[in-house]
Image (spheres, helix red, strand yellow):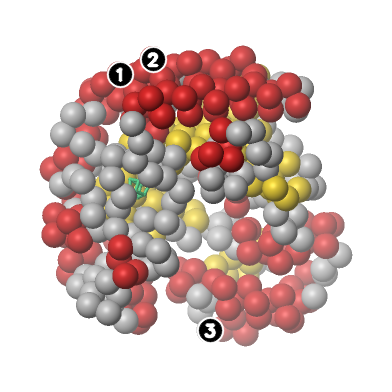
Amino acid sequence: MTDVAAGLGLYLHIPFCIKKCAYCDFYSGTAEEKAIEAYTERLSEEIMKWGGRLCRPCVDTVYLGGGTPSLLEDRLVPLLDAARTAFLLDDGAEVTMELNPAPNVSEALSAAVTAGINRLSIGAQSGNDSELALLGRSHTAADTLAAVRTARRYGFDNISLDLMIGLPDSSVKTLEKSLDFILSAQPEHISAYILKLEENTLLYNKRGIINLPEDDETAEQYLYMCRRLESAGYEHYEISNFCLPGRESRHNLKYWRCEEYLGIGPSAHSFIDGKRFYYPRDIKAFKAGVLPVQDGGGGGTEEYIMLRLRLAEGLCFEVMRRRFGISSENMVKAALPLKEAGLLRVTDKKISLTDKGMLVSNSIITELLENCT
Ligand code: SF4
């Protein structure tokens, strides 16, 4: 069961990149033009199939992620046309495309405008060129600023920048420089993630020789970033996301609010009719028509608490009572010690994490579950 009635979110996965970044575990690889062409056609076919299967439901957010969807350029238009034919795309739909900064992004932006994309998520990652090189990014900080300026010229007034913290050799000082840089670009939205070393990545293989900050140093960076962005007028609306008022990512909110979304493409996940399912991380299987496989979770108590507590809007007592039969007395009893430790805010209607609590959200969720159910 979903949380509130809303349109469907549509995610399209584009598994191609110019080169693999040193930290990246997303399902993506390099490919030739012909392979990109063939994949886009197959993706359009799959979109059409889903439109028929779900009886053309209303879609109010579309997100093209990857990979590097901006590589599609003029193939964006037929892809979005397929989505408009298969689904009832809301007039005010938020249509986001991830874009990597590059010396020349004009062609990608021009195609994005024609395709009806109205929001960009740009992979800035850092304002320090030495950190970008270490991450294996193929752009400089100057390329990011140039991409934002070009996007503004193309009329994009809803831009998100990605930032990574807790990088090798980083400190509050280096982060300060990155934040100065990010803020100078005046984005409407900022996604900021702590670097996690994933197995099978170049950075993971170098783990013995890179100098990652200790956990408490990374925590210090996170709390500094929260203060800095909040004082610059950004709302900290989700553990890793900040926005100017009213500029939340409507698509990503669906994930955290347990609303319905359909993901198409290898590795893409969906949540529909209380069921979670995903396509295997295998482009050959996707091309061969292999169907998505069912996932474990399906809107249970643990999953619901975990997702809702990521959001500043928090966990509402009334919804917990209605959905899971958990009384507000039990919730408050479980929450009070965490409030005293400065990790939770508790009102008469809901609980939510403080910035400090967001750093240890997993242990807070475990403690709440143990004590309120
Ligand atoms: S551009 Fe993004 S998806 Fe591609 S390799 Fe780098 S981090 Fe991964």
The label on residue 152 is: none
Q: Nearer the viewer, mark 3 or mark 1?
A: 1
Determine whether the beta carbon of the residue marked 1 sits less than 8 angstroms from the nearest atom of ligand 1: no
Q: Quadrant of residue 349?
A: bottom right
Element carrying mark 1? helix
How far apart are the alpha carbons under marks 1 and 2? 6 Å
Quadrant in the picture for the C terminus: bottom right
Dot 1 and dot 2 residues touching (CB under 8 Å): yes
Is 373 left, or right, of 254 in this rendering?
A: right
Q: N-terminal of the two: label 2 or label 3?
A: 2
Q: Quadrant of residue 200?
A: bottom left
Question: Picture coordinates of residue 131 (x, y %)?
Answer: 19, 60
Q: Quadrant of residue 176?
A: bottom left
**Label 2's element?**
helix
Q: Position of residue 101 (x, y in %)?
A: 24, 39
Tell me residue 322's x, y (percent): 84, 57
Query: Which residue is found at the position 21% from the left and 41% from the top?
Result: 144
Which residue was labeled with disc 2? Answer: 114
Looking at the image, residue 30 sits to the left or right of residue 64; the answer is left
Residue 256 in picture, x, y percent from top left: 60, 52
Element under disc 3: loop
What amino acid is found at the position of numbered circle 2 in the picture?
A: Thr
Residue in view at x 38 percent, y 68 percent: 197
Name the residue type under label 1. Ser
Residue that badge 3 annotates: 341
Please give the residue where the numbered disc 1 appears in the rendered image. 110
Amino acid type for the residue under numbered disc 3: Ala
Q: CA distance from mark 2 to mark 3?
A: 51 Å
Mark 2 or mark 3, whichever is nearer to me: 2
Q: Residue at x 25, y 58 (%)?
A: 135
Residues at marks 3 and 1, CA–CA distance in whole angstroms:
51 Å
Q: Residues within 10 Å of mark 2 (few under 14, many from 20)?
A: few
